[in-house]
């Protein structure tokens, strides 16, 4: 069972000398159904200009969340791989490439003229793309055909 406790300090609750939470009473309990069919209970405690909220879930959520799916897919790749040292090297190379690309973008952003020129190029290319493929009906059909051919080439169909 998961639980969360939130305690709000007085400056967030008090405006002048009046509390925003006068309607709460001690030990008031709310029950609601969540998306994963879990029951959540919230208990609100109010003391002198101070409120504590305790939230508890009575059941675990479903296993269909994306974070669990990603973890399971990584575990499957790790378990089915024969070259684990290569996977470690590939992961390290991905981290280094990400770090280098963020530093490169930071350096390019500090040069005074380059960000403005790149922004202008992006605006011009976006305008051309809209004019060429999205504005007129034959262009939209051509774009649909190009995307369909690319997807079929990637999937090998």
Image (cartoon, rainbow, N blue to C red):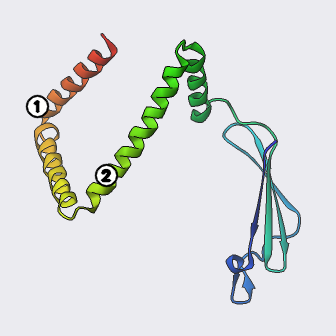
Q: Is residue 131 left or right of residue 73?
A: left
Instruction: Give me the C-alpha separation between circle 1 and circle 2.
Output: 37 Å
- Residue 41 coordinates in the image, percent (x, y): 81, 51
Work out whether 18 lies above or below 67: below
- Residue 63 coordinates in the image, percent (x, y): 67, 29
Q: Is residue 48 left or right of residue 62?
A: right
Work out whether 93 lies above or below 15: above
Q: Which residue is mark 2?
A: 105
Task: Say which quadrant the N terminus sits in.
Answer: top right
Q: Is residue 146 left or right of residue 83?
A: left
| Element marked by disc 2 | helix
- Residue 61 coordinates in the image, percent (x, y): 71, 36
Q: Nearer the viewer, mark 1 or mark 2?
A: 2
In the image, what residue occupies the spot 78% across and 73% down?
Answer: 23
Within 10 Å of disc 2 (Cα), the crowding (few <14, some 14-19, many 20+) is few
Within 10 Å of disc 1 (Cα), the crowding (few <14, some 14-19, many 20+) is few
In the image, what residue occupies the spot 50% across and 23% down?
Answer: 87
Q: Which residue is mark 1?
A: 138
């Amino acid at each position: 069972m998961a639980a969360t406790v939130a305690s709000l300090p007085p400056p967030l609750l008090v405006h002048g000398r009046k509390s925003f939470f006068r309607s709460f009473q001690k030990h008031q309990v709310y029950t609601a159904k969540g998306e994963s069919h879990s029951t959540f209970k919230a208990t609100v405690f109010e003391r002198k200009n101070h409120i504590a909220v305790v939230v508890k879930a009575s059941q675990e959520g479903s296993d269909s969340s994306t974070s669990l799916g990603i973890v399971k897919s990584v575990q499957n790749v790790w378990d089915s791989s024969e070259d684990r040292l290569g996977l470690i090297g590939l992961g390290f190379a991905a981290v280094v490439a990400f770090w280098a690309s963020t530093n490169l973008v930071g350096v390019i952003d500090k040069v005074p003229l380059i960000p403005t020129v790149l922004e202008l190029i992006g605006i011009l290319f976006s305008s051309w793309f809209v004019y060429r493929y999205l504005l007129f009906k034959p262009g939209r059909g051509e774009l649909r055909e190009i995307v369909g051919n690319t997807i079929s080439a990637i999937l090998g169909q």
